[in-house]
Image (spheres, helix red, strand yellow):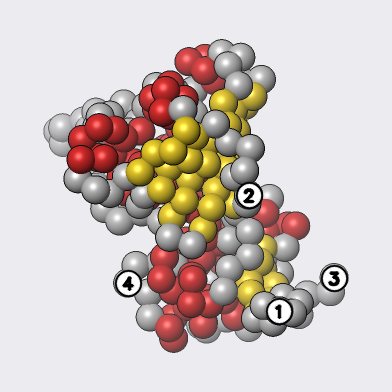
Amino acid sequence: MKLEKVTAKPGRRYHDACGAAHGLDLIGERWALLVVRELMLGPRRFGDLKKDLHGISANVLTQRLEGLEASGVLRRRKLPPPASVQVYELTDWGLEIEPVFIVLGRWAARSPQHDPTLPISAVSIMLSFKTMFDPALAGDAPLVLGFVFEDETFRVEIRDGGLDARRGPIDDTAVVLTTRPELVAAAVYGKVPTAALEAEGGLRIVGDRAVFEQFTGYFHLPEKVGLEASP
């Protein structure tokens, strides 16, 4: 695919041959990396992206989508009938950033200023599983779980010491949780008992709940870094 040269506004690029600097040229604008995040598990419509990116305006989202498309990170396509709607999806090259995103997320979670109680999207919580999963705790135990967030379903599978999370059917899962992303975060990372979340009415579990209880034990937020005092 031949990419057209993108003309950036003066002062918006680093003019540095370092690959990391050019990476920031591509995704360093505010919201750009989060737009990429929301597309990592499959194509999304404009309205879905705006709903899950808390605080972004329609105008800024349009600008970021256009910039990422011009850079070759994402593309637009129209779904076939009966959907017949336009969606945005990452290109193969765009998808290659996932390991970088995961390393960045784990690194940043060690910051004392990181607040895990802030809003989190469904895609974010799925990617957090890939980021914080501890294969040493899971061993060889196979687990398959389903998550339902409004009209979206996600399938998480642990097998052979690895974890895969993706959007899609959940018919073969051992347990299905219908809830909100922030409540999953509370159970998995805050270790809030599932019974307490069920009692509040924000969580419904169908299937083998012991599978989810086992699942929550495979994740821990990393230890916060100690900040050195100024001399």
Element type at marker 2?
A: loop
Query: Marks 1 and 3: CB-CB under 8 Å?
Result: no
Left or right: residue 216 versus residue 103 is: left
Element type at marker 3?
A: loop
* Image mark for residue 55: 4
Closest to the camera, between mark 1 and mark 3, is 1
One can see residue 39 in this view: yes
Pointer 3 local density, CA inside 10 Å: few below 14, some 14–19, many at least 20 = few
Residue 211 appears at what percent x and percent y?
Answer: 46, 25
Closest to the camera, between mark 4 and mark 3, is 4
Q: CA distance from mark 2 to mark 3?
A: 32 Å
User: Closer to the N terminus: mark 1 or mark 2?
Assistant: 1
Q: CA distance from mark 4 to mark 3?
A: 34 Å
Q: Considering the image in quadrants, where does the N terminus appear?
A: bottom right
* Image mark for residue 160: none
Residue beneath the point at 43% across and 60% down: 150
Q: Residue 5's quadrant in the figure?
A: bottom right
User: Closer to the N terminus: mark 1 or mark 4?
Assistant: 4
Q: Nearer the viewer, residue 179 or 23?
A: 179
What residue did someone put label 2 on? 169
Residue beneath the point at 35% across and 43% down: 204
User: Closer to the N terminus: mark 2 or mark 3?
Assistant: 3
Element type at marker 1?
A: loop
* Callout 1 amino acid: Pro
What residue did someone put label 3 on? 1
What residue did someone put label 1 on? 82
